Image (cartoon, rainbow, N blue to C red):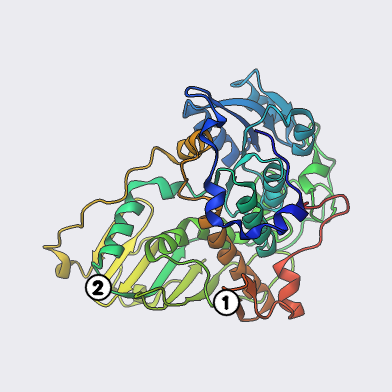
């Protein structure tokens, strides 16, 4: 199964096509052979992913990796035969031949590095959202996956639910007519106000240097590990990066969206280090075939669509509102409703055309075994994550971003204010290649 590719090699072959990232020879596994999986990150979401991966019955958990020895040992109790590591680079040095696939659930600033380490070895990859920390990394991962021709899946678990499928069918059936306007909102935010001044010693069993990874070196901070790193730009991507891949996923899927033409953001005065308490991001997508252009607005914190104030919507904490020529469709993870309700009292739902999922993690492992495509493979979820992350760039730079779909690049990437947030410098010793 192991097949290394070089950075130079994939750059020479990015024309292989997005479909390539969903192909694995059917002979890679025997009929009843399980996939040897390494779980990189076993804390919080990582604990969930480890459990869900194992419960599919399709995986042998052969390696566990986490910077926190206490949490690593806790996870290992359920998988005593798995080897333990506190550094995924050391894991690959020791177990490259034994590992078929990885499941990655670590802080955002490590996503691209852990993903690339697997892709460049020809291994299957499941990575939590957002796929990477910044748009540049996302483009590199998308192109590398296309060359590696392995099974990939981004951790947008709600994509596997029945409710999203029914919403997609409603939109595609024309139930509310052509759609030109979409609103997506979530409550809350990750918005720290100041950097802690205390510098306590690193706890025993925590590999702090590895936790920092490619980010700028800094003293141990108990406010970062294991969760509140999400609000700091050096490590996380704020509420937009954390939640928009779940919620905007529904719009991308239902309307066939990829990249917007332009991205603009509104928010409080940017903090150089920390994510904002509220944000509005305007994504404007081009027409697709007979479908009209779409203006999608993201809201988090205390911002909401105007329809809330007008009393036209149920006051859901999170949701997506599709506005069509014939009516509106509001949806959340587990429910949806056609509006105004009196206009749709006799509505008959369209036939179900999207099959039920076997489960998000099982879909990934079946792909590893058989080459069957996953719905959230990187050719689909990569542009989604790339779009979401460009919202952060628009906010932090204060600039309107203009995307060129033909080149897969920003037209105004030479603007220094944009370039500084589109990609980042890495700590010495860290490289994506």
Against 357, is 57 above or below? Answer: above
Does residue 60 lie above or below 122 as drawn?
Answer: above
- Asked if the residues shown at circle 1 and circle 2 are in contact, with their CB atoms under 8 angstroms apart, the answer is no
Residue 66, by quadrant, is top right
Q: Which of the labelled discs sits on residue 382, or is there none?
A: none
Numbered circle sitting on residue 327:
2
Q: Secondary structure at mark 1?
A: strand
Query: Front-most of 281 and 366?
Result: 366
Q: Residues within 10 Å of mark 1 (few under 14, many from 20)?
A: many
Label number found at residue 265: 1
Judged from this view, the residue extending furthest toward the left is: 346
Instruction: Say which of 376 and 220 sits in front.
Output: 376
Q: Position of residue 227 (x, y in %)?
A: 64, 47
Q: Residue furthest right?
A: 428
Left or right placement of residue 101 versus residue 186 in this view: right
Cα distance in 3D space between marks 1 and 2:
27 Å
Q: Position of residue 46 (x, y in %)?
A: 60, 38
In the displayed structure, 354 sits above or below 14; it is above
Quadrant in which the N terminus is drawn: top right
Secondary structure state at the residue bearing disc 2: loop
Q: How many marks?
A: 2
Q: Residue at x 34, y 69 (%)?
A: 322
At x 51% / y 57%, what residue is drawn?
Answer: 380
Is residue 406 something one can see in this rendering?
A: yes
Count residues near mark 2 (Cα–Cα under 10 Å), then give few for <14, some for 14-19, many for 20+. some
Where is residue 428 shown, x and y percent of the image? 88, 53
Which of marks 2 and 1 precedes in the sequence? 1
Q: Is residue 70 left or right of residue 127?
A: right
Rendered residue at 36%/53% (across/down): 164
Residue beneath the point at 80% across and 42% down: 210
Q: Is residue 189 visible?
A: no
């Amino acid at each position: 199964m192991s097949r290394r590719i070089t950075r130079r090699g994939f750059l020479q072959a990015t024309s292989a096509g997005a479909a390539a990232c969903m192909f694995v020879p059917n002979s890679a596994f025997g009929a009843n052979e399980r996939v040897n999986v390494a779980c990189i990150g076993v804390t919080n979401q990582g604990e969930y992913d480890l459990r869900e991966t194992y419960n599919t019955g399709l995986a042998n958990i052969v390696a566990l990796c986490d910077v926190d020895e206490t949490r690593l040992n806790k996870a290992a109790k359920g998988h005593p035969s798995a080897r333990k590591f506190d550094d995924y680079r050391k894991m690959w040095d020791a177990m490259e031949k034994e590992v078929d696939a990885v499941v990655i659930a670590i802080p955002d600033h490590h996503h691209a590095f852990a993903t690339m380490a697997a892709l460049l070895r020809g291994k299957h990859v499941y990575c939590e959202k957002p796929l990477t920390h910044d748009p540049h990394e996302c483009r590199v991962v998308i192109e590398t996956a296309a060359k590696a021709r392995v099974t990939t899946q981004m951790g947008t678990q709600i994509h596997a639910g029945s409710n999203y499928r029914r919403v997609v069918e409603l939109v595609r059936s024309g139930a509310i007519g052509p759609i030109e306007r979409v609103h997506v909102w979530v409550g809350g935010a990750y918005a720290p106000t100041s950097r802690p001044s205390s510098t306590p010693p690193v706890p025993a069993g925590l590999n702090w240097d590895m936790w920092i990874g490619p980010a700028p070196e800094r003293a141990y901070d108990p406010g970062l590990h294991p969760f509140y790193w999400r609000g700091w730009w050096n490590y996380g991507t704020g509420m937009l990066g954390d939640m928009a891949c779940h919620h905007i996923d529904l719009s991308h899927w239902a309307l066939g969206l990829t990249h917007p033409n332009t991205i603009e953001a509104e928010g409080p005065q940017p903090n150089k280090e920390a994510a904002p308490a509220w944000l509005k991001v305007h994504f404007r997508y081009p027409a697709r075939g007979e479908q009209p252009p779409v203006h999608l607005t993201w809201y988090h914190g205390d911002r909401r669509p105007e329809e809330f104030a007008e009393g036209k919507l149920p006051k859901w904490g999170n949701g997506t509102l599709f506005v069509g020529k014939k009516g509106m469709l509001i949806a959340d993870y587990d429910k949806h409703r056609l509006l105004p309700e009196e206009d749709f009292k006799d509505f008959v739902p369209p036939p179900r055309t999207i099959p039920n999922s076997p489960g998000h993690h099982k879909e990934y492992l079946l792909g590893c075994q058989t080459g069957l495509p996953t719905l959230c493979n990187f050719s689909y979820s990569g542009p989604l994550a790339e779009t979401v992350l460009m919202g952060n760039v628009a906010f932090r730079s204060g600039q309107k971003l203009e995307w060129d779909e033909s080149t897969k690049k920003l037209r105004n990437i030479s603007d220094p204010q944009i370039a500084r947030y589109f990609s980042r410098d890495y700590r010495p010793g860290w490289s994506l290649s």
